[in-house]
Image (cartoon, coloured by chain):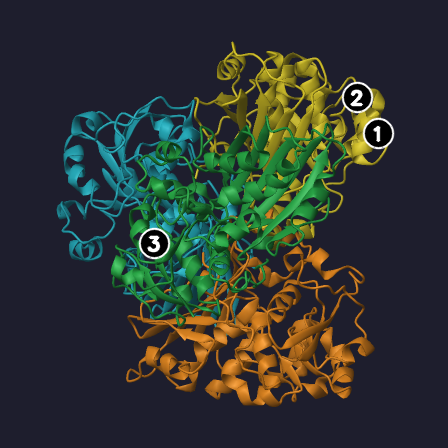
Chain colours: A green, B orange, C cyan, D yellow
Amino acid sequence: MLHVGIVGGTGYTGSELLRLLLGHPGVAVSAVTSRAERGMAVCDLFPSLRGRLSLSFVEPTLEGLAGCDLVFFATPNGTAMKMVPDLLAAGTRVIDLAADFRLKDPASWERWYGQPHACPELLDEAVYGLPEFNRDRIRAARLVANPGCYPTAVTLGLVPLLEAGVIDPDWIVADVKSGVSGAGRKAELGLLMAEVGESFKAYGTGGHRHAPEIMQNLALFADRSVNLTFVPHLVPMVRGIQATLYARLTRADRQPHALFASRYAQEPFVDVMPRGSHPETRSVRGVNLCRIAVNEQPGGVVIVQSVIDNLVKGAAGQALQNMNLMFGLDETAGLISLPLSP
Amino acid sequence: MLHVGIVGGTGYTGSELLRLLLGHPGVAVSAVTSRAERGMAVCDLFPSLRGRLSLSFVEPTLEGLAGCDLVFFATPNGTAMKMVPDLLAAGTRVIDLAADFRLKDPASWERWYGQPHACPELLDEAVYGLPEFNRDRIRAARLVANPGCYPTAVTLGLVPLLEAGVIDPDWIVADVKSGVSGAGRKAELGLLMAEVGESFKAYGTGGHRHAPEIMQNLALFADRSVNLTFVPHLVPMVRGIQATLYARLTRADRQPHALFASRYAQEPFVDVMPRGSHPETRSVRGVNLCRIAVNEQPGGVVIVQSVIDNLVKGAAGQALQNMNLMFGLDETAGLISLPLSP
Amino acid sequence: MLHVGIVGGTGYTGSELLRLLLGHPGVAVSAVTSRAERGMAVCDLFPSLRGRLSLSFVEPTLEGLAGCDLVFFATPNGTAMKMVPDLLAAGTRVIDLAADFRLKDPASWERWYGQPHACPELLDEAVYGLPEFNRDRIRAARLVANPGCYPTAVTLGLVPLLEAGVIDPDWIVADVKSGVSGAGRKAELGLLMAEVGESFKAYGTGGHRHAPEIMQNLALFADRSVNLTFVPHLVPMVRGIQATLYARLTRADRQPHALFASRYAQEPFVDVMPRGSHPETRSVRGVNLCRIAVNEQPGGVVIVQSVIDNLVKGAAGQALQNMNLMFGLDETAGLISLPLSP
Amino acid sequence: MLHVGIVGGTGYTGSELLRLLLGHPGVAVSAVTSRAERGMAVCDLFPSLRGRLSLSFVEPTLEGLAGCDLVFFATPNGTAMKMVPDLLAAGTRVIDLAADFRLKDPASWERWYGQPHACPELLDEAVYGLPEFNRDRIRAARLVANPGCYPTAVTLGLVPLLEAGVIDPDWIVADVKSGVSGAGRKAELGLLMAEVGESFKAYGTGGHRHAPEIMQNLALFADRSVNLTFVPHLVPMVRGIQATLYARLTRADRQPHALFASRYAQEPFVDVMPRGSHPETRSVRGVNLCRIAVNEQPGGVVIVQSVIDNLVKGAAGQALQNMNLMFGLDETAGLISLPLSP
């Protein structure tokens, strides 16, 4: 039995980790931390877990966590990096669901997250936790940087084209749309239902923190820099991300759809749908799955649609997938439930 | 391995049965029928099931179904009663998720459902599938009438009070609210998102088909007729039922909350929450669970809140629970996942 | 031209007042105050007003406001009472959209609002601003207490029955449902779309501040105390209140529907719908209107459905109606637009 | 007083026309037709209009309509073209809110709408009713083709750039998102709230009927053909369209934002917001207004956001604007209400 801890258990990523971990046959949750809610029963904050978990929130301490085989950080950006070196030194492996270890360049991290990085020496070691491209390195990792929700949807939807060298990397458009849970469980006016319900808008046209993470991914597979125009939007729903990706084909001899079908044929958590499909976010609700459709329009334009549940394949589910890889478990353990639709 | 068939697999109850059955370790789905969609792959209609089910819809025939150990009817009202006698004669057991076998009085059935009953001789044998009150009879049943969604929420929320004889049966109010999936997957103007989204209304104040079913239940436990005022409402959301139940206490010496806590202490799928609670429908989203809160207001009024997922504890989940009982399986098999919240 | 000011212009009640006042032919908005947003252009906070209003938020001061003919308070409870005496002394009339002057008993006010009342001597003078019952007194009032949203819906839906003495005042049930804008524009976790979207729940079963206000109203018209069981619920939508009201008839010789039709025949802002109707909240979206349906169920039960837009007839629209009365304008001026449906 | 008729008054465009026309000071609605609902009071179908309109639906006949100064067609595509020649001959002017007269090329019309055009000889005369670009021709028109909702949002958001010749017409991306009322009031499974609520998807990647209409517009102003990639999406909300438009700048010496500000400076129904803005659909809810934001991203990419209410500036409101122009009324008459937000 694997013993795991969760640091920062009061947000949506934390509660989703708990939902999934409690259904995993080989894991025991040893500790869930929260400074603010210390002493409160976890089930009192999350009644959906009543009857299935008897833990209370505890203070995050090295002593309390070092006994775990693995610690998940579901904390705000900038928190994990302060505790991770000590945990690793104590022999505890770490999956960080925040952004602390996603960017390889500490200067870029500081620019986007507004503070110097606390342990830049770990950035090289940290493995970017996208199993579809990094499976073997994840297996051996001490420290996994779990990808952001937008980067997961966009990267899975573009890399097969970039790897094959069939699209023009000089201009790719990613128009992405997210449900409101993507913004986290924070008391902000802009997230009130009376503000975002029954309305739709873009945000972050001036630059979003996930853009450099995506471009770092894309450059790796294109083997050159990629000019990505990335615009996120807020959808009046709770869960789900849909990305519509636009690129121009540079080679007429390769079928885009076939590239995806072949690239992901063995992937348990990527579903390439038939041509002409339009995946709905509800078709992945609650599950660790990315569904992709690949279509073309006149003028040599390829349009990729990619949908995930932002809290599962975009966060907690992907973290479990990484955990399974790191500890030699079946990669799909705890991740085989079916989507809730409708 | 239990072999089951589903008659009428194109509605929300049918697809929810599939979602749950595909996660059940001891069941194989042998046939899913639909006259209208015959020949179509089930996954093409329900992309959320892609990769997990290779069946296509078939014509419903006695030959095709009689090989099943159990057949679920997820059909419109009035369909099951035409096939059930032959299936039973062939040795196949049946759970009907429609209303055909819920009312014991065929005249009442005809009044509410607009046609004579096709096999009134089976009404006595049919067991009302509310395990919390009928567990032993369900175990032995050939034919189970799976309760309606409203009746499940209201009955679970009132019977402990009626059994104990502590409320006035001369006037009980059930103000119930349902998400739109409760109306089924039907092309009707009144169910369009542009009609019901961002709006709220009551309906059926003149009488709803679920009222006689509820009153039949309540009378059984009160051992007299009960005067219930039942008003359903439509909530602009997809899943979930919330019932607020109002009654007047006739005895001051019994604590209503304690009656519920005691009555349901051993029930795996009823959660009596602490005093002062307000259960949310999302706290049972996707799971076979009824959460109940019991509070009081001045003047000797008891207020019971009861929430279920209309498609799970109100339909397909309860049907699995009944199936488990009928076939001697663990009652909770296939029903232990956690709610999707948020 | 009437000159008006708004104290507390950053909430939903304030912005709705602005929307309506800017469409009123005889009113000029002279000042909109906000301590927190002082100096900010009102349109920068509320882009929906762009191009129609050039004011910026100012500090609320007696000097700045005393020049107005009328000041609306759209402030949190307990704010108006500190400024109103000085404004009245300066000759400025006041409509308070908060609760400060709604309850006649200062002890009750202190109990429900958690602080002593700052000017209990004004409670008698303050006129409760429900024009359908208080029209003449409103015309002459210096100080109007604008009713709460729930009290407006419930009072309009019960008083004709109580006035006629045809229902049992010993037990009336008000099951009321509100969109989330009713909770105001406040950065609270419980109001996030990720918390309340796609879910439904009751709240305040232990007692809600609007209950004593409603009971004060009902007692006045019943000429005795009324035992009301009041339970509010939160609907996953932005605007609208629906109240379902249940009472038992004590006289069989009076038709409930006829009582409503007669009582409200001349009212411009109450619509008594035909028997069998089920008013939707969207049918009053954006307008100063209460739609009512009156139906009966067996056992002598009358069921009244009452719907309003919580921000219009439940707040800002009713305030304009009161303003029109106070200043001798056409009661419907600025209030004749049609509902936005769908 | 202008006398107008509405053919096809049972859809959302028809009811929205009624809402707006009933608030217009210079118009009387003489007839509303519907074959299916003939004889029914309009208010019984649309309770939101109760008390404001006494008409019943009538059969659409030339005799009944020819007495009108103007007839609006709010019918399915292909209906207006069968009646318009006779109406024009009778001296009645026409605004068609469907697609019958939008495309200049009858072959293209037949390809996209699946039937031959019934009066191709009128296609040249018909004036495309986008007042911001066609104001003078609309004033003189007998027959106005009211633009589609997507074409309104996209055309207003691209033409200033094309007119100025500052973007590359070889590839422009229009990622557009619509609330469900855009699909009309039709009993289709795909529009049920249980199908589209709490989910998001693209549709029509294989080609949408509005694409040729948009490209016809853009080519006109670019003075050459434009390669537009157009992908519509369905948002789980009732009203509103948001278009995010992506193009590459070909000239560095012209500021995109300034081009819009200048082009629309005198337009009463286009609001160019400050740089850095993100217009929400709710900021135009219920009003005849297009709000536009213009931002840039590295690599010479201009991003235009354009929001309208699909039923107002995208349909009925624009039709009133055209009517005002055609009959010499103030262009803003009946169109000055403020958006409903929240």
> Which is nearer the eye, B302 or B269?
B269
The local crowd at label 2, few if under 14, some if 14 to 19, many if 20 or more residues have their Cα within 10 Å, is some
Label 2 or label 3, whichever lies nearer to me, is 3
Residue under the image location 30 percent in, 60 percent down: A65
Relative horizontal placement of residue C158, taking residue D19 as reference (left or right): left
Q: Which chain carries label 1?
A: D
Disc 2: host chain = D
Q: Which of A322 and D82 is in front in this view?
A: A322
Dot placed on the residue nearer the N-terminal end, 1 or 2: 1
Which residue in the protein does label 3 denote?
A88
Marked residue chain, label 3: A
Amino acid bearing label 1 = His
> Compared to A263, does A338 lie above or below?
below
Q: Would you name the residue on which mark 2 appears?
A: D123
Please tell me if label 1 and label 3 are on a single chain.
no
Amino acid type indicated by mark 2 = Leu
**What amino acid is found at the position of numbered circle 3 in the picture?**
Leu
